[in-house]
Image (cartoon, helix red, strand yellow):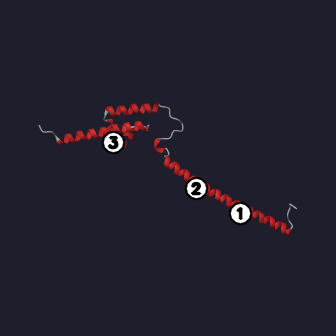
Amino acid sequence: MPPDPLAEAAARRHELTRSKAIQALRELDRAGAPVTYTSVAAAAGISRSWLYTQPDISDQIRRLRTLIERQPRPANSIPAGQQATDASLRSRLATALQRNKALADENATLRRQLARALGDQRSARTRTGNDPAQ
């Protein structure tokens, strides 16, 4: 009997899907990301329902999920996807430094204006004879 091309294609597709799921599992575990059916399916680009039909992959997901749930997490831990990158931190620092310089310049300008206004006020009082310092 000749080989069935549809059966062969289905077998190749099945093996490709399995390899995607296993690779996604490994990457999520290595990254310390939560290992759930949803996260594995999203990372592998496959359906969640297919994962449930694979006993070995399903067992591994449950095992990794249990291991991660048992590990103590620091109270202030931030998920890897939400942590700031070095580039974003540098950008925020540069912006803060620019803002700090602008505020320092504005502060110096306001101090000069205040000193000038107080000097003018004092001059006006001395000219009219209302200077309490005398």
Residue 35 seen: no
> Where 89 falls versus 132 (above or below)?
above
Q: Is residue 133 left or right of residue 34?
A: right
**Circle 2: residue type:** Gln
**Sequence-first disc among 1 and 3:** 3
Q: Is residue 4 left or right of residue 57?
A: left
Residue underneath mark 3 = 47
For label 3, the crowd category at 10 Å Cα-Cα, with few meaning under 14, some 14 to 19 and many 20 or more, is some
Q: CA distance from mark 2 to mark 1?
A: 23 Å
Q: Which mark is residue 74?
A: none
Residue underneath mark 1 = 113
Query: Where residue 98 sits: x, y (%)?
Result: 58, 55
Tag 1 secondary structure: helix
> Residue at horizontal 80%, vertical 64%?
122
**Circle 1: residue type:** Gln
**Sequence-first disc among 2 and 3:** 3
Q: CA distance from mark 1 to mark 3?
A: 68 Å
**Circle 3: residue type:** Ser
Location of residue 21 (image quadrant): top left
Q: In the picture, which quadrant includes the N terminus?
A: top left
Query: Where residue 62 sits: x, y (%)?
Result: 39, 32
Residue 115 seen: yes
Discs 2, 3 touching: Cβ within 8 Å: no
**Sequence-first disc among 2 and 1:** 2
Tag 2 secondary structure: helix
Q: In the picture, which quadrant includes the C terminus?
A: bottom right
> Residue at horizontal 61%, vertical 56%?
101
Q: Which label lies toward us, 2 or 3?
A: 2
Q: Is residue 23 left or right of residue 101?
A: left
Residue underneath mark 2 = 98
